[in-house]
Image (cartoon, rainbow, N blue to C red):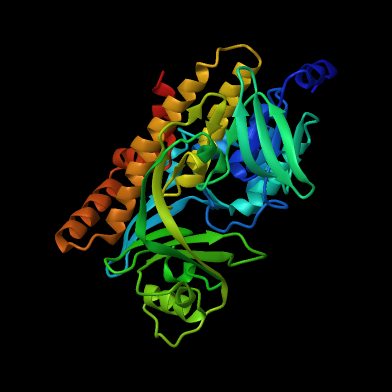
Amino acid sequence: MSATQNQAASQLLPVIVVGAGPVGLLCALELARRDVPVLVIESEAGTTLDLRAGTFHPPTMEMLGPDGVADAMMQVGIKVRHWQSRDREHGLIAQWDLDVLRNDTPYPFRLHLEQHRLTPILLEKLLAYPHAQVLFSHAFTGLTQRADSVQVQALSASGEVQLHGSYVVGADGGKSAVRKSVAIEFDGYTWPERYSVVSTTFDFEPLGYADNAYVSDPEQWIAFFRMPDKGPPGLWRMTLPVGPELSDEEVLAPAFARQAINRAIGAPESNNYPIVHQSVYRVHQRVAKQFRAGRVLLAGDSAHVNNPLGGFGLNSGIHDAVNLGDKLARVVHGRDSDALLDLYDRQRRTVAMEYVQTISIKNKENLEEKDPLKRQARFDEMRAIAADPDKTRAYLLTSSMINSIKRANAIT
């Protein structure tokens, strides 16, 4: 940045971003690279270790290209060209080759990289800008909107602090304190079952599994993802539903993980495996009633949450961050009126409802379908799509979220 640009940025009130996860840090980075001063506050003492999200779709990689973020991710992530639709009883149903999208995107693959490996990259890129600041151990406690600014209250180790900014971006997760502070409703529901995540160094590739595979099963579906680790074969992560008959303690016991792996591969229950990580969590399908309330904007999980089947959650949050960063910078610099922020609301909320919610719910229903006739019809449909190049490309344009970006951009 030139001295003139730096001086211009210093004369503006900062945009205050609440939450130093991938969405908050990326939104801040998008603003900083457009000469907008930013202040990120985060209640935790540093970037957190979150092992849930870890799949990045082609348009997301395109958005992460500036500042070298995508290049840094690819140095440590796993490029996934093929992913599979499988069934526990019938085996492989279809294998999808993302290379058919090579004329649609410069990134015709999924990248597997856990989000805790992305946040340090974003943080380093952000702090390279002199008009960007990140305050850890600062918990958001409230805000007051004024005609031309926002006053934010936060609690630090030394007591309450007052922060003055032009706008506030709430990127503080599904339990967003920012969203609650402006009384935006979070419509939707919570699934009755919990989701378990099991990570193991046991290698599923020799058994025919691609680096990403969704295995349908009327009793207990499983989603497989190979993640980078210290070395080969990487870390294989399994996500599966668990019913109310099991306590969290039972789900987090090694015996549960061993049983899940043995059941998935049809091995004797006595087989043992190296278990690296286990967790269990509740899953929600919710979308905020609005993504804007005056000078307060919502992005990522603060605005919408969904089940993880399809890998839409973090990706759609990143799409929010890039869309909002561009529009908010134009408003802050006076190039557009703040009505442009209503367009952000329309574009991203529409996609959250029509695309992310609808398809992630449908993905879950397909994996757990119990009716044999409906299951067979689905298998036949998937095989027919995979056998036709044009149908395959159309299917992957949607599952890879390329069509969701086109849909958002078409909204005016």
Image coords of residue 24 (percent x, y): 62, 39
Relative to 303, say whether 382 is above or below: below
Q: What residue lies at 34% left-to-right and 64% top-to-bottom? A: 221
Direction from residue 370 to residue 334 in the image, left or right = right
Q: Please say if 353 is above or below 196.
A: above
The relative height of residue 212 versus residue 15 in the rendered view (above or below) is below
Point out residue 275 in the picture as x, y percentages from the top left corner.
Answer: 55, 75
Camera-side residue of 182 and 336: 182
Q: Which residue, as the protein is rendered here, is positioned at the far bottom? A: 270
Percent of width and height locating residue 346: 42, 25
From the viewer's perspective, is 360 left or right of 230? left
**Image vertical order of residue 370 relative to residue 358, above or below:** below
- Residue lying at 82% horizontally and 18% vertically, measured from the top left: 7
The reply to whether residue 106 is visible in this rendering is no
> Quick check: can you spot residue 265?
yes
Q: Nearer the viewer, residue 215 or 144?
A: 144
Compared across the picture, whether 92 is left or right of 133 comes to left
Q: How many marks?
A: 0
Q: Quadrant of residue 17?
A: top right
Which quarter of the rendered picture does the C terminus lie within? top left
Left or right: 99 as drawn, with respect to 324: left
Quadrant of the rendering where the N terminus is positioned: top right
Residue drawn at the location 28% of the way across and 43% of the way down: 388
Farthest right residue in view: 3
Q: At 36% from the left edge and 78% from the top edge, which residue is drawn?
A: 266
Q: Relative to the observer, which residue lies in front, 119 or 151?
A: 151
